[in-house]
Image (spheres, grey):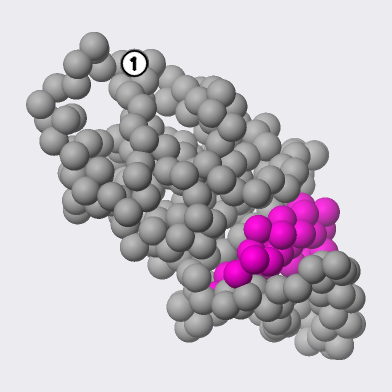
Amino acid sequence: MKLVIIPVDFSESSLNAAKYGVKILAASPETEILLYHVCDKPDSYDNRMESLEKLKEELLINKSANVTLLSETGDFITELEKLARHREADMIIMGITNRSALAQVFVGNNALKMAENKFCPVMIIPANAEYNEIKNVLLATDLKNTNSTTPSSPIKKILTAFNANLHIVNVNSEHYIALSETFAEERQKLADMFADFNPEFYFLRLYDVDEAIEQFARDKSIDLIITIQKEHSVMHKLFNAGHLKKLAYESTIPVIAVHE
């Protein structure tokens, strides 16, 4: 990955995301980590840059990483989207809070809005997430039209950046002992697509998708969950307000949203 943007508003959740992002990317000097702040008032620019400089120094104690800084004035979502498009960012890393309901509205809504964008994967760092080296990545899939709806390029960038093991999981209450011919064909397409990463496949005959994924992630020591945003699909519900609250607010595992 060439560029990862980490928005910082100096809240506890954004500082946690910055710490997490620098730790997981410190071993990739070719990746530019951009700490990004949007000022609501032009006259606060100098103070914000000083704060960003101080944060950078703190993050780089006893480690090296390619960290740059940028502060702009304007609307947070608008400016962040423009920056990600203009710089062709590979990923945005954002924090989310599990504290007061009011804080969840402001911080959670921003994270959700960015997760809905279709031009850049967004990693959401739960408030309770503690740094773990990313060794095991879970890719959740509905196994439908996989060739046309699986954004293989950004997913491969993520897997390559972290040199991680890939676990592909499908949850479907209709699974039996043997896969249907259709599911078997879609499985093979994914196996071919990610052949370089030697994926392991798991088929869970359960009804509650997000609960099944949470349990699987705990059982298999998953360090990162990737969900594919598909409109009108069963996997899309993972990122509606209620299910994201459960997955991100209560979980300790970072989640990346990518779009078909």
- Classify residue 231 as left or right of residue 106: left
Where residue 128 sits, quadrant-wise, is top right
* Closest to the observer, 102 or 37: 37
Report the magenta residues as a range.
3-28
Residue 54: image location, x then y, percent: 89, 76
Q: Which residue is mark 1?
A: 205
Q: Residue at x 46, y 78 (%)?
A: 88
- Classify residue 145 as left or right of residue 96: left
| Residue at far top of view | 177
Residue 3: image location, x then y, percent: 55, 75
Q: Residue at x 51, y 62 (%)?
A: 161
Residue 238: image location, x then y, percent: 46, 36
Above or below: residue 245 compared with residue 155: above
Above or below: residue 154 compared with residue 187: below
- Number of residues whose C-alpha sits closer than 10 Å to that of mark 1, classed few (under 14), some (14–19) or many (20 or more): some
Residue 136: image location, x then y, percent: 52, 42
* Closest to the observer, 95 or 44: 95
